[in-house]
Image (cartoon, helix red, strand yellow):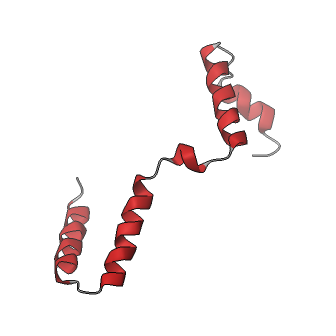
Amino acid sequence: MDINIQNKKIELIQWLSTLNDESIIEKIMKLRDNEKADWWKAISKEEKKSIERGIQDAEAGKLKSHSEAQKLYEKWL
């Protein structure tokens, strides 16, 4: 793992260990809980259906190559 990330983690741990403001601690806890949230539960029914259709298409071999997709959508790219 990147040493810079490790240093940042250590710095955060040291800061957290001295923190006494309960409201900041609660905000950090909520941030942590949001990071653990399952994105599948957060998306719409339409998005879920679209993903499921894509999986079904892939399983059925209904796939296009990257170059074919580029040609098809080049006017929007």
Residue at left offset 35%, top offset 81%: 24
- Compared to residue 28, the image places residue 72 above or below, namely above
Residue 51 image offset from top left, x and y in percent: 64, 33
Q: Looking at this rendering, what residue extends furthest in the top direction?
A: 60
- Compared to residue 49, the image places residue 41 above or below, namely below
Camera-nearest residue between 21 and 54: 21
Residue at left offset 31%, top offset 77%: 25
Q: Looking at this rendering, what residue extends furthest in the bottom direction?
A: 21
Residue at left offset 69%, top offset 26%: 53
Residue at left offset 36%, top offset 83%: 23
In the figure, is residue 24 to the left or right of 55?
Answer: left
Camera-nearest residue between 48 and 70: 48
Q: State the image quarter where residue 73 is shown.
A: top right
Residue 5 image offset from top left, x and y in percent: 26, 63
In the figure, is residue 43 to the left or right of 17?
Answer: right
- Compared to residue 12, the image places residue 60 above or below, namely above
